[in-house]
């Protein structure tokens, strides 16, 4: 269990502490990364990235790991705070510059327009960065914050959203209906015997 890759030296202290705590929590489960992936709906490779500090985990992944490890209450809240601090301090990889896509004056071209040396093509009016206007399911930080939750987590969330009040009248209605059915059965039984 304790054979973890060394964390990069340049990691901020908040990230290092958070990942070390996640590793301890994962070790506490006694599970392999495959088993952890099955229980949390995050893949083995995702857990490898999270536990080697290659990528910050989504908050729901941390919550799922806490649940699997049997962590609850204040300890789960501490992991939430550690997560927030780590995500804020997580090193951001510089985004490589995206070459512009040239749009000629006559309208869009059916394929990419290649212009050596970055010179505008003759008749080009506008320059639009590649990927401009494409919306992704990822945030600006480069990782998905709200992943698809496993069905068992959705049941917990749904039941916590429903107020307890509407259940009580429904139970009373069922109890009254059961009493009426029992009473009718007793009357029918008495009439047939008598």
Image (spheres, rainbow, N blue to C red):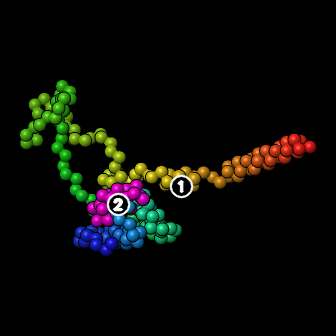
Rendered position, 193 above or below 78: above
The answer to whether residue 50 is magenta is yes
Q: On the image, numbered disc 1 is attached to which residue?
A: 156
Could you tell me which residue is drawn at 71 percent across and 50 percent down?
Answer: 171
Q: How many neighbours does mark 1 have within 10 angstroms: few (below 14), some (14-19), or many (20 or more)?
A: few
Q: Secondary structure at mark 1?
A: helix
Instruction: Give the residues drawn in magenta, as a range.
Output: 36-57
Separation of marks 2 and 1 at Cα, in angstroms? 24 Å
87 in magenta: no
Is residue 47 visible in the rendered image? The answer is: yes
Asked whether 145 or 140 is in front, the reply is 145
Residue 27 location (% of width, % of height): 37, 71
Q: Position of residue 167 (x, y in %)?
A: 67, 51
In screen coordinates, is 5 left or right of 153?
left
Q: Is residue 67 left or right of residue 5?
A: right
Q: Quadrant of residue 132?
A: top left
Image quadrant of residue 19?
A: bottom left
Residue at (24, 58) in percent of width and height:
93
**Upstream in sequence: badge 2 or badge 1:** 2
Q: Nearer the viewer, mark 2 or mark 1?
A: 2
Residue 57 shown left or right of residue 70 in the figure: left
The answer to whether 70 is drawn above or below residue 58 in the figure is below
Name the residue that disc number 2 marks: 34
**Quadrant (top left, top right, bottom left, bottom right) of the C terminus:** top right
Secondary structure of residue under mark 2:
helix
In this view, the residue in front, 107 or 83, is: 83
Q: Nearer the viewer, residue 71 or 31?
A: 31
Is residue 13 visible in the rendered structure shown here?
Answer: no
- Which residue is most to the right? 194
Image point (30%, 53%), residue name: 142
Which residue is found at the position 20% from the left and 27% from the top? 107
């Amino acid at each position: 269990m304790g054979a973890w890759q060394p964390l990069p030296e340049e990691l901020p202290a908040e990230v290092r502490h958070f990942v070390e705590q996640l590793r301890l929590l994962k070790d506490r489960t006694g599970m392999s990364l495959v088993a952890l992936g099955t229980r949390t709906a995050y893949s083995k490779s995702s857990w490898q990235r999270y536990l080697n500090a290659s990528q910050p985990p989504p908050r729901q992944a941390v919550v799922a790991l806490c649940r699997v490890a049997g962590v609850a209450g204040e300890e789960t809240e501490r992991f939430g705070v550690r997560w927030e601090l780590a995500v804020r301090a997580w090193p951001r990889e510089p985004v490589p510059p995206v070459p512009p896509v040239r749009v000629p004056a006559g309208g869009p071209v059916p394929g990419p327009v290649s212009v050596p040396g970055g010179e505008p093509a003759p008749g080009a009016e506008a320059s639009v960065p590649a990927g401009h206007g494409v919306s992704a399911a990822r945030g600006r930080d480069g990782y998905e914050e709200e992943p698809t939750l496993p069905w068992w987590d959705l049941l917990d969330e749904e039941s916590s959203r429903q107020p307890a009040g509407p259940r009580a009248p429904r139970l009373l209605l069922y109890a009254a209906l059961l009493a009426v059915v029992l009473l009718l059965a007793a009357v029918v039984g008495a009439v047939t015997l008598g």
